[in-house]
Amino acid sequence: MTDNRLHYPATARNRDAIVAVLRDVLPASGVVLEVASGSGEHVVHFAQAFPVLAFQPSDPEEAARQSIAAWARQAGLANVRLPLALDAAADKWPLSSAAAILCINMIHIAPWRATQGLLRGAARLLPAGAPLYLYGPFRRAGVVTAPSNEAFDASLKARHPEWGLRDLEVVAALARDHGFSAPAVTEMPANNLSVVFWRT
Ligand SMILES: C[S@@+](CC[C@H](N)C(=O)[O-])C[C@H]1O[C@@H](n2cnc3c(N)ncnc32)[C@H](O)[C@@H]1O
């Protein structure tokens, strides 16, 4: 049998710190949509940490969806759904509601229109009071960007001119325009941030 599981080493390093933040963010019940699930290692870990919630992974890449399905199958979890083909930038998403949305390490590794689509889609799907959780490196006004993040930004831009670290203030303004609260920010290991916007 072919093993389709991808392995992203960073997920093992950041997943418990993310779960610690999610404990104060996720609702008591409902479906949690993950946008850009990648390998699927995060969603399997989250589903184990929050067994009462149902997790809906997604990714536009077929190889990622195969990996997500393989990790979920191997874990034997009843609360991870089959992955959806979801491009955050698209006007239509393949589901119409969610109790929370997670998007980890995507907005800097995709063109800006993916972030715009993410906010548009999250505004459509989430009810008032529901969270949109983002994780990754950001630039912040008045805060010197860590040298490791500057180097990462340069390497992202070398790979694709439309990629790169986003300004937290610009993302927050976009979120506000789509009916979200000001961000609740938690500093995370390795100069990353957890950023939570609440649907108003
Ligand atoms: C660096 S990986 C992060 C994966 C995973 N969230 C993690 O932290 O390990 C970036 C992911 O974003 C996905 N992605 C890129 N553009 C996207 C878009 N427009 N909509 C949704 N996902 C996208 C890629 O397919 C990839 O799986």
Image (spheres, rainbow, N blue to C red):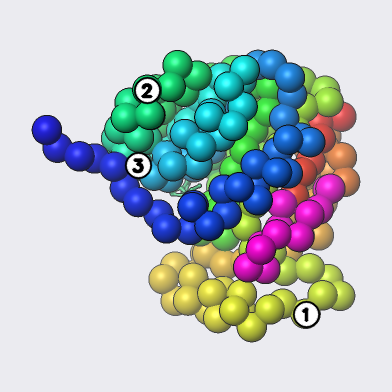
Kind of residue at disc 2: Gly
Kind of residue at disc 1: Val
- Residue under label 2, please give it: 76
Mark 1 or mark 3: whose residue is earlier in sequence: 3
Towards the viewer: 195 or 12: 12
Mark 3 or mark 2: whose residue is earlier in sequence: 3
At 40% from the left edge and 54% from the top edge, which residue is drawn? 8
- Identify whether 80 is placed above or below 16: above
- Identify whether 68 is placed above or below 18: above
- Identify whether 2 is placed above or below 110: above
Question: Left or right of 64: which side holds 120?
Answer: right
The answer, for residue 66, to whether it is visible in the render is: yes
At 58% from the left edge and 22% from the top edge, which residue is drawn? 51
Secondary structure type for disc 2 = loop
**Magenta residues (range):** 183-194
Which picture quadrant has residue 59? top left
Determine if the magenta segment contains residue 54. Answer: no
- Residue under label 1, please give it: 144
Q: Look at the numbered disc 2 and say if its residue's Cβ is closer than 8 Å to ligand 1.
A: no
Mark 2 or mark 1: whose residue is earlier in sequence: 2
Question: Left or right of 200: which side holds 42?
Answer: left
What is the number of the mark on residue 64?
Answer: 3
- In the rendered image, residue 17, in percent from the top left (x then y), is placed at 65, 51
